[in-house]
Image (tube, rainbow, N blue to C red):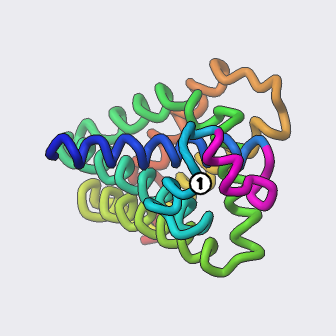
Amino acid sequence: MTGAEKRRAARIDQVLDAAADCFVEYGFHNAGMAKIAKRAGMSVGHIYHYFENKEAIIAAIVDRESALSSQRFLELDAIAPSELAEAMADRAARSISDNSDIIQSVLNMEMLAEGQRNPEIAKIIQRHDEHVRKQLIRLFGEKLGLCDAEARADMLMVVVSGLASRVLRHPGLDRAKLVPVLRQTLIDLMSPGPICKR
């Protein structure tokens, strides 16, 4: 990237981070462009230079997460099939604090709630979900050769999204105690086992 492109990307990230903070603190409807601009340390007009409206900001937040997911899947593609289950279990254990981070959990819930009211937001969220789901199905089915790859992918997504909501319902959640259980769950999920119907 050129210097100008790097500066533009940094400004966009600045807006997205500020918007995410505001959505968590005030809720989507109460987080107006003025609040986002103040949090980002720039003018409202400057934000409109990058984003048409709040829906476009949410789309960009979700797209940023999709890009990170794509990078993670590229890294998993480089791992031998015989080591993939253990590597994914290790990665999930290391990232358990991210998936159960209260701020990220509130942001996810706020966007899901807005998706129930706004069909455009729902489409954005569903597009990201389908992107991640397809990559997991590919890993389970093609790379690991497992049956029921779709059901396994959905179950893994249930576990991860459930963890994000669990921290809101139980703020005192002992994350360290979840790590060995989560590791074993993922290893079982990525093993042939008795799940397959012959």
Position of 118 relative to 16 (above/below): below
Q: Is residue 102 left or right of residue 18?
A: right
In this view, the residue in front, 60 or 161, is 60
Q: Residues within 10 Å of mark 1 (few under 14, many from 20)?
A: some
Identify the residue at image location x=82%, y=29%.
171
In this view, the residue in front, 133 or 19, is 19
In this view, the residue in front, 115 or 137, is 115
Q: Position of residue 53 (x, y in %)?
A: 59, 68
Identify the residue at image location x=40%, y=48%.
191
Residue 49 colored in magenta in the image: no
Q: Residue furthest right?
A: 169
* Residue 126 in view of the camera: yes
Position of 175 relative to 125 (above/below): above
Position of 33 relative to 185 (above/below): below
On-image quarter of the C terminus: bottom left
Q: Is residue 187 left or right of residue 20?
A: left
Identify the residue at image location x=71%, y=34%.
102
> Which amino acid, mark 1?
Val
Q: Position of residue 168 (x, y in %)?
A: 80, 39
Q: Position of residue 193 (x, y in %)?
A: 45, 51
Q: Judging from the image, what secondary structure is the residue with disc 1 in? A: helix
Q: Quadrant of residue 11?
A: top left
* Residue 154 in view of the camera: no
Q: Is residue 83 left or right of residue 177?
A: left
Identify the residue at image location x=64%, y=48%.
36
Q: Residue furthest bottom?
A: 119
Q: Which residues are magenta?
A: 26-38
Q: Badge 1 is on which residue?
A: 44
Q: Position of residue 17 (x, y in %)?
A: 54, 41
Residue 28 colored in magenta in the image: yes
